[in-house]
Image: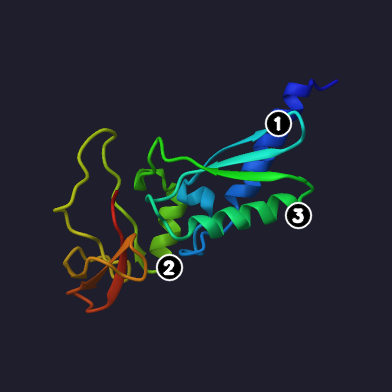
Amino acid sequence: MVSADAATTRLEAELARLAGSVPDPELPVLTLGELGVVRGVRVHEDGRAEVTLTPTYTGCPAIEAMSADIERVLTGHGIPRVRVTTVLAPAWSTDDISAEGRRKLAEAGIAPPRPHAAGGPVPLALSVRCPQCGSTDTELLSRFSSTACKALRRCTACREPFDHFKEL
C-alpha cells in the first residue's frame, strides 16, 4: 500500500517532468526544464497544482506564454486546476541551464553561455567559441540579438555570424 505522501510526491515529480518538457517560446530548441526556469511543483490537498517558475530576467516577455503552455500541458494530463506562480528569488542564472540544454544550444548554432564558479564573478572578457567551426577568434557585432538574452557575434575565422546566449 502506497502512502498518500508517496503518491503526492510521485505526482509532483511527474507534473514537474511535464512542465519541464514545455518548449521555451523564444528558444524552442530548449525545454523549460533544460533552461532551468521550472523551480517546482506542488499538489495541494484539493487537487490544485501550483508550478513555480523563475523568468530568465525580470520583465521577460515570454513568461506569460510559458505559464499558458504549462497550464495547457498539465490540464491536458487531467489536472483540473493549475496555477503558475512567478518567483524572482533565487534569481535565475545561466548556470541553471542543463548540460543537455547547452549541447542543444550549440547544436542549433547558438554559443551557449560559459559556466562560472558559484558565487564568483561572471567572466566577461573571455572569448566566445564559434558554434560553427569552434574558433575562439570571434567579435561582438551587437549586444542584443533576436532576444535580450542573446548577443550577435561573428567568427573571424569562418566569417559566420552567430548568436551567443549571454552569461547572467
Relative horizontal placement of residue 140, taking residue 60 as reference (left or right): left
Identify the element where label 2 is drawn: loop
Check whether the beta carbons of the residues at disc 3 and disc 1 lie within 8 A of each other. Answer: no
Relative vertical location of residue 14 with respect to residue 159 in this rendering, above or below: above
* Identity of the residue furthest to the bottom in this view: 159
Dividing the picture into quarters, in which one does residue 149 lie?
bottom left
Relative vertical location of residue 148 with respect to residue 2 in this rendering, above or below: below
Q: Earlier in the sequence, mark 3 or mark 1?
A: 1
Q: Residues within 10 Å of mark 2 (few under 14, many from 20)?
A: some
Relative horizontal placement of residue 66, taking residue 122 as reference (left or right): right
Mark nearest the camera among 2 and 1 is 1
Relative vertical location of residue 18 with respect to residue 28 in this rendering, above or below: above
Residue under circle 2? 108
Q: Disc 1 marks which amino acid? A: His
Residue under circle 1? 44
Identify the element where label 3 is drawn: helix
Gap between marks 2 and 3 measured at Cα: 29 Å
- Image coordinates for residue 157, horizontal then vertical, percent: 18, 74
- Image coordinates for residue 52, horizontal then vertical, percent: 55, 40
The one nearer the camera, 123 or 143, is 143
Q: Disc 3 marks which amino acid? A: Gly
Q: Which mark is residue 76?
A: 3
Q: Disc 2 marks which amino acid? A: Ala
Q: Earlier in the sequence, mark 2 or mark 1?
A: 1
Identify the element where label 1 is drawn: loop
Residue found at x 50% / y 63% = 29
Q: Earlier in the sequence, mark 2 or mark 3?
A: 3
